[in-house]
């Protein structure tokens, strides 16, 4: 299974494509930004080319809408070869919709790729009710620490997921030795190639909290607020 995620920022989109095995192991197949930056390692506040510069004549919402459409189109046109030679394409894609939700939904609709959906991360703490105990509602599909539903006054079916749970799962997968069936591995490149990704994957810290009989690693961004967009 191949999945993609697009993190939406005011100036830039961060995207990543991963492949997943039946044992819950994973591989980072590719990642990048829209628009593409000339430097491999950069900080968001220092970028040279942002969305409005990449789409002259469009306002912020218009540039964001077009960027999401173009990013989805580019990702869905890409094919990845499995070790047995089979061609694979993205099975499911999510687009962060917390920022400028109207523009995000419009960009997804413009792309006309049904495998992409808006998504909303929910930081469920130890003292909060887990998703499994949320009140059941008509039209809501439940999964393992995620739900799929159409939010009130929104156009598109959307995914809500427990960010603390899934960040912990990914963190554990990255720590496991690469030969393990549940490890998450990066594609092979020089260490410097992945330095910015590594910095962002290490941008937050987990605080283990216990409440109401639950133990949860709650992920927090330090006060200096480093870039965390690939992790977020």
Image: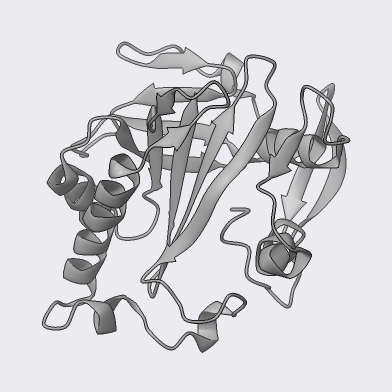
Seen at 63% across and 53% down, the residue is 231
Left or right: 141 with respect to 229?
left
Residue 210 horizontal side relative to residue 101, left or right: right
Q: Measuring from the top left, give residue 92's x and y in whole percent.
A: 39, 30
Between 58 and 132, the residue placed more toward the observer is: 58
Q: Nearer the viewer, residue 98 or 56?
A: 56
Q: Residue at x 40, y 14 (%)?
A: 141
Name the residue rendered at 71%, 56% in the picture. Answer: 201
Q: Is residue 95 above or below residue 65?
A: above
Looking at this view, is 114 or 217 the one in front?
Answer: 114
Question: In screen coordinates, is 156 left or right of 28?
Answer: left
Q: Residue 10, percent across and down?
A: 38, 72
Indicate the colouring scheme: one colour
Q: Is residue 124 visible?
A: no
Image point 20% across, 52% down: which residue? 107
Q: Position of residue 151 (x, y in %)?
A: 30, 33
User: In the image, is residue 167 above or below residue 34?
Assistant: above
């Amino acid at each position: 299974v191949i999945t993609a995620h697009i993190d939406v920022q005011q100036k830039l989109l961060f995207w990543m494509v991963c492949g997943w095995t039946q044992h819950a192991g994973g591989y980072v197949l590719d990642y990048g930004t829209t628009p593409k930056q000339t430097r491999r390692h950069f900080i968001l506040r220092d970028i040279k080319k942002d969305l409005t510069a990449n789409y002259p004549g469009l306002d912020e919402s218009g540039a964001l809408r077009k960027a999401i459409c173009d990013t989805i189109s580019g990702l869905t046109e890409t094919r990845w070869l499995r070790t047995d030679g089979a061609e694979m394409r993205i099975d499911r894609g999510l687009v962060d919709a917390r920022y400028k939700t109207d523009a995000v939904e419009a960009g997804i609709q413009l792309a006309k790729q049904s495998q992409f959906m808006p998504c909303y991360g929910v930081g469920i703490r130890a003292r909060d009710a887990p998703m499994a105990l949320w009140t059941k509602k008509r039209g809501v599909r439940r999964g393992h620490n995620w739900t799929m539903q159409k939010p009130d006054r929104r156009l598109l079916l959307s995914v809500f997921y427990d960010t603390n749970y899934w960040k912990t799962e990914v963190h554990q997968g990255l720590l496991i030795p690469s030969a393990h069936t549940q490890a998450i591995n990066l594609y092979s490149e020089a260490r410097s190639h992945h330095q910015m990704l590594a910095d962002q994957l290490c941008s937050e810290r987990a605080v283990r909290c216990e409440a109401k009989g639950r133990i949860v690693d709650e992920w927090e961004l330090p006060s200096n607020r480093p870039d965390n967009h690939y992790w977020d």
